[in-house]
Structures are given as C-alpha cells and as structure tokens.
C-alpha cells in the first residue's frame, strides 16, 4: 500500500478559514485510491512567505524525505506557495526524494 502525507494551508489564523475541508476531501481521495495517510500537516500562514519562514511546510517536506513517503496530497498547488520560485523549490525537494505530488484542484 502506498503511503501519503496531507499538507493543508490557509492564510488566516482566525475563525474565518480552517483546513478541515481540504483534509476531508484529501482523505476521501486517499481512501478511494487505497492510499494510507501516515501524517497530516496543517498550517495557518500566508503562502507568500518563503519556505524558510513556513515551519510546518519545512517539517512536512523533511518528514516526507525521512520517512520515504510515496505521495504528498494537496488540495491546490497554491498550498505550497504563491511564488512560482517557492513552489518549484518545494517540488524539487520532493522530486529529489522520489515523493509524488497529487494536486486535487
């Protein structure tokens, strides 16, 4: 069975936004594909921040590498960041670690 990690992010830390919809939708996908979710990372921070400023994203990427996770599940590509360069840096880290990325939308 393949293993996966969910990374969910919203920009606001107030009650207006939360990550629950992203997580539930990605859990449903994982179940339908017989993928085991081994960890879930949630972050409340602007996607405009650099990878180095996003502690939870850094932990997620490191976990995927360390634990040889097969797939990182995202609701949207923008969850990795707003800057094309930052997104590409994250994808490069995952690619080097042979972690596939599933983007729902």
Image (tube, grey):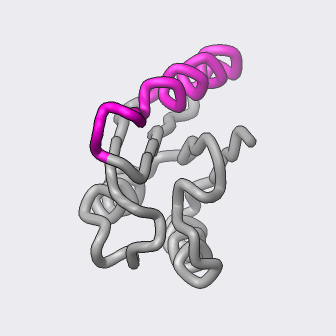
Q: Quadrant of residue 65?
A: bottom left
Q: Is residue 51 above or below residue 94?
A: below
Q: Nearer the viewer, residue 23 or 98?
A: 23
The image quadrant where one finds the N terminus is top right
Outermost residue, bottom side? 85
Residue found at x 39% / y 34% = 16
Return the x and y of residue 42 as percentages of the image width and height.
34, 42
Q: How many numbered markers are drawn?
A: 0
Residue found at x 58% / y 62% = 98
Residue 103 as seen in the image, left or right of residue 39: right
Q: Read off the magenta span.
A: 13-37
Return the x and y of residue 72 as percentages of the image width and height.
54, 47
Residue 66 magenta: no
Residue found at x 31% / y 66% = 54
Return the x and y of residue 24 as percentages of the image width and height.
52, 20
Q: Is residue 28 above or below residue 82?
A: above
Residue found at x 66% / y 23% = 29
Residue 34 magenta: yes
Return the x and y of residue 9 as percentages of the image width and height.
43, 47
Residue 14 as seen in the image, left or right of residue 85: left
């Amino acid at each position: 069975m393949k293993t996966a990690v969910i990374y969910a992010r919203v920009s606001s830390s107030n009650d207006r936004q939360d990550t629950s919809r992203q997580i539930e939708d990605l859990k449903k996908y994982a179940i339908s594909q017989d993928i085991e979710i081994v960890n879930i990372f949630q972050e409340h921070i602007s996607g405009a921040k650099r990878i180095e400023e996003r502690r939870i994203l850094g932990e997620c990427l490191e976990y995927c590498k360390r634990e040889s996770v097969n797939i990182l599940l995202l609701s949207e590509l923008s969850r990795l960041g707003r800057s094309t360069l930052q997104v590409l840096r994250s994808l490069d880290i995952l690619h080097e670690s042979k972690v596939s990325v599933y983007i729902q939308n």
